[in-house]
Image: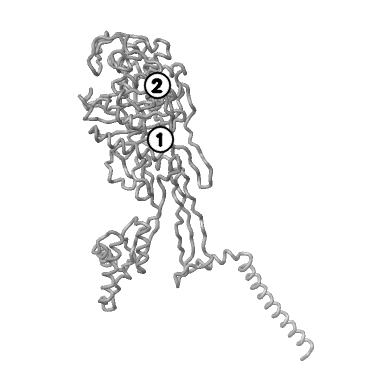
């Protein structure tokens, strides 16, 4: 080979080698890109290509509701929806027949499944048969929703492969009907519908997470390393001011008293004087949130917060307090009153019982609960002034606590009062109030004239431990300490000298109280004859007020006056004072105020 040919051959070899090296270099660069630079992206692509995506919901637990002592009133448990694969049950042969042994096994297994689920075996078989008939290729049919963990475990122990389970959180109320009307309830889909559940949903609500992954297209197995997890966040804990032991007792007691008096319903409310904490808000009929449908819809909510009524004589105390505060009367100021009188403007007013013309002190008008006497005392103040005092004590001022469905109460402006309303507003008629509004008014008097906002929720503790206190407003002075203490003395004398004094006595304690008998409005106007909403409210010990208790009975028939509520007040007050170990003291007022002059 000549030198020129040799040089040409070497050149071709070098070019070929360069080309090979270039190609190899490209492969190396691409390999580095795949395995190092963009490794994660390419792995994800390789996983997803030809594979199926799967995911599971990671359920967060809805927060618990507890009482003032940490007793759990509402919590979340796991429930299960039970499904079956009809294609696996009694599989048919190629000729369409079913092996007798398979048929017998299905008969036995379906009976066992039905027994655990509380179903009829034929119903289980029918669900499967209908699905096979209507959707032969379907691998899913639901047998039952919302079964317990115990039922779930029992089904798993059967060892059958054709059952599947969808877990889902469900609400449980371990104390049944105790505070049930306050706690509220959820829908079957977990939506908070009523009570504290709805009110405090922002605190209680959990945030579900998710685990996503890839499943091999050929083997259906989860691919390791493909998981991505968004963790769930549990809901917070809501602490109430309620004492569940006290609530339980009062629910039993008010149920008995309501039935004894043949009333439609009854309530009892207890609040601390110095803190405004609601310790109990019991009612009859009550609701067990574990079985909401067992209770008539009328009684699924809270009667304590959802009832409006004319407060009647309980609000004579507000009239008296405004007279004292304005300086136009003292406890011993007097007016002369008959049991029925025609007033100069044409209004005709009467007392609940007959009596001759008498000269009542202001204290005596409260003791004998004289509408006529209170009307005359009320004329010492202009309508606008009395209206402003009713507003200061909470009438028409909106909800007290903010509970879902809590009513407002209502009062017209004084320029719209007619001749009858001019007087009726002095003794608790011609306007409406709520139970919390009446309790708040008496808490103000008992607390030396300072209103502390009533509250039912103590705190919300989030999943990360942060404690949040609800905004309830600041304490506010409504009347002077002097006026409040004069009112305490007058109401103590009412409790000691009134017609129900013997029925409300608690040995070792002096009770300040006032009854109220409200007429109920008729559909066509006016009032229903002989039909009343009765109440009594009191605080004790009268010389050092610590607790306010209010009782209501709607349309009692055995005793139609407010005397119907007296036995319940006595039982409730006795239990409260003894349970909270209030030291006994005097049993009667240090100063006995005269009823008459």
**Residue at the image point whose x is 36% and y is 69% from the top:** 159
Q: Residues within 10 Å of mark 2 (few under 14, many from 20)?
A: few
Residue 531's place in the image compared with 181, above or below, is above
The residues tagged by marks 2 and 1 sit, at their Cα atoms, a distance apart of 35 Å
Indicate the quadrant where residue 422 lies: top left
Sooner in the amino-acid sequence: mark 2 or mark 1: 2
Residue 579's tag is 1
Q: Name the residue under label 2.
A: 391
Do labels 2 and 1 touch, CB within 8 Å?
Answer: no
Indicate the quadrant where residue 589 lies: top left
Image location of residue 10, percent across then percent down: 75, 84
**Residue at the image point whose x is 65% and y is 72% from the top:** 28
Task: Mark yes or no: residue 506 visible.
Answer: yes
**Residue at the image point whose x is 27% and y is 34% from the top:** 258
Camera-side residue of 61 and 551: 551
Q: Nearer the viewer, mark 2 or mark 1?
A: 1
Image location of residue 223, percent across then percent down: 50, 68
Residue 16 falls left or right of residue 84: right
Camera-side residue of 466 and 285: 285
Camera-side residue of 590 and 305: 590
Residue 459's place in the image compared with 354, above or below, is below
Where does the N terminus fall, quadrant-wise? bottom right
Image location of residue 91, percent across then percent down: 30, 73
Mark 1, secondary structure of its residue? helix
Most distant residue in the bottom direction:
1
Residue 565's tag is none
State how the image is colored. Answer: one colour
What count of labels does the image hold? Answer: 2
Residue 386's place in the image compared with 276, above or below, is above
Where does the C terminus fall, quadrant-wise? top left
Mark 2, secondary structure of its residue? helix
């Amino acid at each position: 080979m000549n030198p020129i040919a040799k040089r040409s051959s070497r050149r071709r070899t070098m070019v070929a080698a360069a080309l090979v090296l270039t190609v190899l270099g490209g492969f190396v660069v691409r390999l580095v890109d795949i395995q190092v630079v963009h490794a994660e992206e390419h792995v994800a692509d390789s996983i997803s290509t030809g594979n199926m995506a799967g995911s599971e919901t990671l359920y967060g637990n809805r927060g618990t509701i507890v009482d003032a002592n940490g007793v759990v009133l509402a919590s979340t448990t796991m429930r299960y929806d039970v499904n079956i694969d009809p294609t696996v049950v009694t599989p048919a042969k190629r000729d369409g027949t079913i092996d007798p042994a398979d048929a017998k096994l299905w008969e036995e297994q379906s009976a066992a499944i039905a027994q655990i689920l509380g179903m009829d075996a034929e119903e289980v078989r029918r669900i499967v048969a209908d699905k096979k008939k209507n959707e032969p290729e379907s691998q899913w049919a639901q047998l039952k929703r919302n079964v317990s963990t115990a039922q779930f475990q029992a089904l798993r122990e059967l060892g059958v492969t054709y059952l599947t389970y969808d877990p889902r959180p469900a609400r449980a109320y371990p104390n049944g009907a105790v505070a049930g009307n306050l706690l509220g309830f959820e829908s079957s889909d977990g939506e908070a519908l009523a009570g504290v559940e709805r009110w405090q949903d922002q605190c209680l609500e959990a945030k579900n997470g998710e685990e996503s992954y890839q499943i091999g297209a050929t083997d259906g197995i989860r691919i390791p390393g493909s998981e991505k997890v968004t963790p769930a966040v549990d809901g917070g804990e809501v602490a109430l001011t309620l004492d569940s032991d006290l609530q339980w007792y009062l629910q039993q007691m008010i149920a008995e008293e309501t039935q004894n008096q043949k009333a439609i319903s009854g309530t009892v409310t207890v609040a601390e004087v110095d803190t405004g904490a609601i310790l109990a808000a019991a009612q009859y009929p009550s609701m067990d949130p574990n079985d909401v449908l067992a209770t008539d819809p009328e009684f699924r909510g809270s009667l304590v917060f959802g009832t409006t009524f004319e407060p009647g004589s309980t609000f004579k105390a507000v009239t008296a307090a405004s007279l004292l505060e304005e300086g136009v009367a003292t406890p011993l100021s007097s007016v002369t009153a008959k049991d029925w009188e025609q007033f100069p403007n044409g209004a005709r007013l009467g007392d609940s019982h007959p009596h001759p013309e008498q000269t009542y002190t202001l204290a005596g008008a409260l003791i004998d609960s004289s509408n006529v006497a209170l009307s005359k005392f009320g004329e010492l103040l202009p309508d606008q002034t009395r209206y402003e005092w009713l507003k200061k004590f909470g009438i028409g001022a909106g909800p007290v606590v903010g509970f879902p469905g809590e009513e407002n109460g209502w009062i017209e402006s004084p320029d719209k009062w007619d001749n009858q309303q001019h007087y009726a507003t002095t003794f608790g008629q011609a306007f409406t109030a709520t139970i919390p509004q009446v309790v708040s008014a008496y808490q103000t008097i008992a607390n030396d004239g300072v209103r502390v906002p009533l509250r039912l929720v103590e705190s919300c503790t989030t999943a990360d431990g942060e404690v949040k206190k609800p905004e309830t407003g600041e304490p506010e002075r409504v009347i002077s300490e002097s006026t409040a203490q004069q009112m305490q003395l007058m109401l103590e004398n009412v409790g000691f000298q009134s017609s129900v004094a013997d029925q409300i006595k608690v040995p070792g304690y002096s009770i300040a109280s006032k009854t109220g008998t409200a007429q109920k409005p008729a559909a066509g106007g006016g009032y229903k004859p002989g039909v009343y909403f009765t109440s009594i409210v009191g605080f004790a010990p009268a010389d050092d007020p610590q607790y306010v208790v209010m009782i209501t009975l709607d349309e009692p028939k055995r005793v139609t006056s407010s005397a119907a509520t007296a036995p319940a007040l006595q039982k409730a007050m006795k239990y409260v004072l003894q349970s909270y170990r209030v030291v006994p003291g005097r049993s009667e007022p240090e100063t006995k105020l005269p009823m008459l002059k």
